[in-house]
């Protein structure tokens, strides 16, 4: 019998997105906001839309404000379908100022 493999894993054509980390309060999980810009179908004005993805961060290396690259993977939980590939750029550390 021929060995069946996952065609996505074999070809390496998994989707990747670059976005900003908006939350890292969960254990081994980050929330990444990905920006998408496209022209409106009728009016041709550039529209910006955002989508949040839950990604697996095994080593807890991403912090809030970082720009990261994520890649799709098998379902890891109810909402997690992505995993962290790399931290592209470190964000500015946010400090709470008591006013």
Image (cartoon, rainbow, N blue to C red):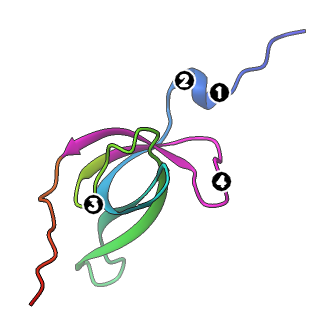
User: Mark 3 or mark 1, which has the lower sequence index?
Assistant: 1
Residue at image mark 3? 64
Q: Are marks 4 and 2 in contact (CB under 8 Å)?
A: no
* Separation of residues labelled 3 and 1 (CA atoms): 34 Å
Of callouts 3 and 2, the N-terminal one: 2
Query: Secondary structure under badge 3?
Result: loop
**Left or right: where 30 falls relative to 46:** right
The numbered mark, 1 or 4, whose residue comes first in the sequence reads 1
Left or right: 38 as drawn, with respect to 52: left
Identify residue for label 4.
Answer: 77
User: In the image, is residue 13 above or below residue 71?
Assistant: above
Instruction: Say the numbered circle drawn on residue 11.
Output: 2
Q: Position of residue 5 (x, y in %)?
A: 72, 21
Residue 7: image tag:
1
Labelled pair 3, 2 in contact (Cβ < 8 Å): no
Question: Among all residues in the image, which is located at the extreme front?
Answer: 98
**Mark nearer the viewer, 3 or 1:** 3
Image depth: mark 4 or mark 2 in front: 4
Q: Secondary structure at mark 1?
A: helix
Write down the quadrant of residue 78 in the picture: bottom right
Neighbour tally class for label 2: few under 14, some 14-19, many 20 plus, Cα within 10 Å:
few
- Element class at badge 2: helix
Q: State the residue at coordinates (50%, 32%).
A: 13
Question: Residue 75 in magenta?
Answer: yes
Residues under labels 2 and 1: Cα distance?
Answer: 6 Å
Residue 22, placed above or below residue 91: below
Which is closer to the viewer, label 1 or label 4? 4
Mark 4 or 2 closer to N-term? 2
**Residues tagged 2 and 1 counted as in contact (Cβ below 8 A):** yes
Residue 52 image offset from top left, x and y in percent: 43, 66
Neighbours of disc 4 within 10 Å: few (<14), some (14-19), many (20+) = few
- Res. 96 image quadrant: bottom left
């Amino acid at each position: 019998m021929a060995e069946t493999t996952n065609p996505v894993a074999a070809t390496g054509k998994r989707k990747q997105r670059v976005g900003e980390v908006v939350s890292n309060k969960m254990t081994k999980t980050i929330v990444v906001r990905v920006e998408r810009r496209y022209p409106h179908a009728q009016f041709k004005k550039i529209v910006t839309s955002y989508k949040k993805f839950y990604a697996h961060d095994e080593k807890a290396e991403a912090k809030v404000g970082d720009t990261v690259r994520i890649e799709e993977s098998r379902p890891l939980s109810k909402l997690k379908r992505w995993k962290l590939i790399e931290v592209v750029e470190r964000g500015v550390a946010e400090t709470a100022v008591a006013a």
